[in-house]
Amino acid sequence: MPDQLSALYSEFLEGGYDCVDRIVLNAYFSMGQSGGGFRVWWRELYGSDENLDDNHLMRMAGRFSRRLRAWAQANHIPVVYCSAGEQKHKIAEQHLSTHEVKSGLFLILVSKAPALVWEAQKTGTGKLGQLVPKDPWPYVNHYSFHILDPDWGHVTIKMSGHPPFGAQIILNGHEYVAAQAQKRGIEFTKQENCFTAVTDAAELTKVADTLSQKETAGHVRQLCERWIYRTCLCFALDLAEQKKSNFQYQYSVFQMEYSRNLLF
């Protein structure tokens, strides 16, 4: 759809494209959102809920941290602990610009953020009574897995270290356009989200338009499934434990931005 700015500067424009910009998806394990559902899942994982208490819940979070740090050290993946207010995406972009990075996980950033954490309340006889969410949600370690995907470029999966391991998947539509343009042989120069020069603006527009097609929802889900279980959740639950307990994420859109880009 034409706009006044494009019409005003039409004689100076080489072209333009509309593009889905920032996409943030919530990933959640539906059974883990209620006390009863979490209890059923725990029974599937361990055979009973006799050991469902605060100590074992904390041990699960501790195992996540230990496994992650041991694996990262063995595979030479940096783990950086960030303080409040640090722009973690900028840290990752700086790493990408100064290191040779292959497809896959290249950086893990750790920071505190609120998350759903369950508290196991006991009856007078010492047996498990009910599970209640801590209120307010406590600040716990979140692990931001920075991944270089062949189709989507720089992808971030931010996951809570406490069960039920809620996560967010953060995508950038311009990263997708750049990755697809390279596959099609379209030459360009890019600064952050801006394409500053393009050899074929019309072809770049076609690439950007693919993000608005219905099939994109399926492609986004495939992206999530490609990384979230084997690359992120595996530190909390190995693949056998995920299968045994039927742990499976559902996804919902938390944030989506759309931008119009003019090529002068």
Image: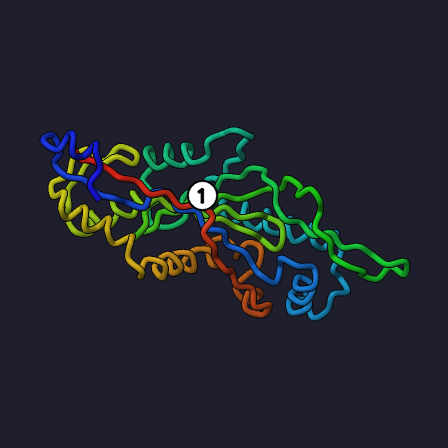
Q: Quadrant of residue 123?
A: bottom right
Instruction: Find residue 232 and report its horizontal and vertical position in percent.
Output: 49, 53
Q: Quadrant of residue 201?
A: top left
Question: In the rendered image, which quarter contains the C terminus?
Answer: top left
Residue 72 visible in rendering: yes
Q: What residue sits 15% from the left and 46% below the top?
A: 186
- From the viewer's side, name the closer residue of 255 and 174: 255
**Residue at the extreme right of the image, as rendered:** 124
Q: Secondary structure at mark 1?
A: loop
Q: Residue at x 20, y 48 (%)?
A: 181
Q: Is 97 located above or below residue 119 in the figure? A: above
Q: How many marks?
A: 1
- Is 169 placed left or right of 115 in the picture? left
Q: Residue at x 80, y 55 (%)?
A: 121
The reply to whether residue 75 is in sight is no
Q: Amino acid at mark 1?
A: Ile
Q: Residues within 10 Å of mark 1 (few under 14, many from 20)?
A: some
Relative vertical location of residue 107 with respect to residue 230 in this rendering, above or below? above
Residue 119 lies, in percent from the top left, at 73, 51
Quadrant where the N terminus sits is top left
Residue 198: image quadrant is top left
Residue where numbered disc 1 is placed = 77
